[in-house]
Image (cartoon, rainbow, N blue to C red):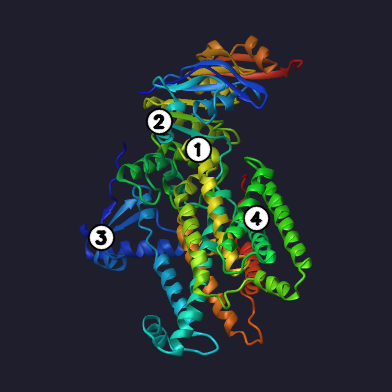
Amino acid sequence: MRRLEARSLSVDLATRRALDRIDLSPAPGRLTVIVGPNGAGKTTLLRALAGLTEPAGGDVALDGVPLARMRASDRARAIAYLPQGGFVAWPLPVAGVVALGRLPHGEKPDRLSQAGREAVASALRAVGLQGFADRPATALSGGERARVLLARALATQAPVLLVDEPVAALDPRHQLVVLEVLKAHARTGATVVAIMHDLTLAARFADDILLLHQGKAEAFGPPEAVLTGARLAAVFAVRAQVLAQAGGLLVVAESPLPGP
Amino acid sequence: MSKPNPPLVHAEKLDGRQRARMVALIASFRRTLRQSPPMTVRCFFERKRCLSSGHFVLYPRGATKTASMSLFRSPLLPGLIALVGALSLISLAIGPAPIAVPAVLKALVSDQGAAGIVVREIRLPRTALAGLVGWILGLSGAGLQGLLRNPLADTAVFGAPQAAAFGAVLVIYSGLVGSLSWALPFAAIAGALLSVGLVVAVAGRGATIVVLVLAGLAVGSLAGAGTSLAISLSPNPFAVTEIVFWLLGSFEDRSMVHVLLAAPFIVLASGLILSAAPGLRALALGEETARSLGIGVPLLRGLIVAGAAVGTGASVAVAGSIGFVGLVVPHLVRPFVSYDPARTLVPAGLAGAALLLAADIAVRLVPSAAEVKIGVLTALLGVPFFLWVIARRKADLVETPA
């Protein structure tokens, strides 16, 4: 059980302050979802949590050790990161792509250890692509490719998994499949942080929601506490209905409010 | 940690008829679906024999499938090595005075009079250079294609060959040194590194492929213009002819000194590129993913670009510009290594060596007053071939961001 923590984290992008003194400690075993309007700093925050961005102030620490002081390989074993809109440059076989998740363990994809092979197989099973091992990853549909890349991140078996918009551009079924995989992964004790745009889906699957607004943490907590009509109006500039339902909240954006 | 799926069928537990039906079923899957059956056959020894004798276990697909990647032991590498060896022998045997292969082998190790001199002092340097230059061109091309995740990348993308030629021409033209000096490879390598540095500086970090190609085109044109300027300002028409012919690329009349000039740099360049191999795999998923997997992307980029520049400089210094080898050979070998960019490197180098050896043999066989320049031949054959590859493999040549 390892604890990832952003401590008063600030990040500058070019001349702009993209993140301003963010404190975040996503809980192990829970799915934490980051939401916010375009340009709120969601991706910047996730990259910083993955140790891929130099903080301008504060830091990100894993069990109290700042990521900047960790060796790249140690960090890679502990934190798996799945960027947005993933692609595969060569027609590599699906199993080969997933096996790349074993690189942090010093395993070459064509010479996996027994543990590595099992990790790859179980990651493919988790996303429901057992029969796809030999298919070229470039010849898959968008939903299949997204699941392959997610399996790659799972195959690292890192205690922390960070995913950037895993369900963007997926059909409803694949959205549910991917989110269920993330939730199940969190339930195994992993810390899972995902960026999402669909507030209803976020409310339904998230254990905790972080609402980002202009680089600042606007609210953090369970979906019902964070997603209120007043907050959505203030942050997203939309008039929204938040309806409580059996399966979770239903968030319906009705009309745009005058922009800031 | 999950266990692999339990086996479906232990063939040894079946009787003869059941087993025969099982084998027929596997075969029919392969024939009709043109793909492997939805289960994995694990054999205990050679596949054909174990299928007929029933020494195999069927697993549901996915349980041991990743193992099939490590079972990839194709005859590609031994085949390529044998091909390079055979072509080297032919290269030693062929020329204005053909020498039989057994005589060639004898001449290599003992004094055989005129034949020995021809083989050791004329054909051996030529053969060694064709092999070395082909190797490093193929390796550089595969390395750059892996780095840029673009199947159209080559040292020419950075204007490196033109810049290396310009560096070398400056040295020759200035008349400071003869064409057999250590200054030549250094000048060519400096030219190549300068062009690469200039392209990277102009294009900036995280440049897209289009920006890189445009910057490379510009730098290459600039170096070409510099070379033309040097030629047109040359007071000596013989020097002009010398430079122009040398620029066309050839292994004719090279000596062991040329080999010694180029070899250390080619070895260095190979080391730089091969040391970057593991990271190339991760780069297939983009730089962000590669970094998150613990790969030092800037170091990787530096190793491959420096290796390609040093290799190109050394090649141009001894053989002039020979194009299209680095562009073409990675495409030839990639399907045999499951498109793994790391495992493409060595086969691409060997295929490059084989290609240049074959081309160098071909130019000697063409009946003409003067030898056809090998750089001309590789372009004449390479370009149509490459167009054919592009036309056939459009689907594989996926669009990628830089």
Task: Determine if marks 1 and 4 fall on one subunit.
Answer: yes
Q: What residue type is labelled 4?
A: Val
Image height check: is B112 above or below B73? below
- Looking at the rendered structure, which numbered label has been put on residue B157? 4
Read off the chain for label 3. Answer: B
- Looking at the rendered structure, which numbered label has been put on residue B44? 3
Please report whichever mark, 3 or 4, sits nearer to the chain's N-terminal start: 3
Of tags 3 and 4, the one toward the viewer is 4
Please report whichever mark, 1 or 3, sits nearer to the chain's N-terminal start: 3
Q: Quarter of the image holding residue B227?
A: bottom right
Q: What residue type is labelled 3?
A: Phe
| Pick the front one: B11 or B134 | B134
Q: Dot 3: what SS?
A: loop
Label 4, label 2: how many angstroms apart (C-alpha)? Answer: 38 Å
Image height check: is B371 above or below A216? below
Of tags 1 and 4, the one toward the viewer is 4
Check the picture and name the quadrant holding the N terminus of chain A.
top left
Query: Relative to A73, is A202 on the left or the right?
Result: right
Label 1, label 2: how many angstroms apart (C-alpha)? Answer: 13 Å
Label 1, label 3: how many angstroms apart (C-alpha)? Answer: 40 Å
Residue sitting at x 75%, y 67%: B231
How many other residues sit within 10 Å of disc 3, few (<14), some (14-19) or many (≥20)? few
Q: Dot 1: what SS?
A: helix
The residue labelled by disc 1 is B291
Task: Determine if marks 1 and 2 fall on one subunit.
Answer: no
Query: Residue B353 at what x, y percent from top left?
Result: 50, 69
Of tags 4 and 2, the one toward the viewer is 4
Do residues under tags 1 and 4 come within 8 Å of each other at their CB atoms?
Answer: no
Query: Residue B184 at what x, y percent from top left?
Result: 59, 63
The residue labelled by disc 2 is A78
| Pick the front one: A13 or B32 | A13
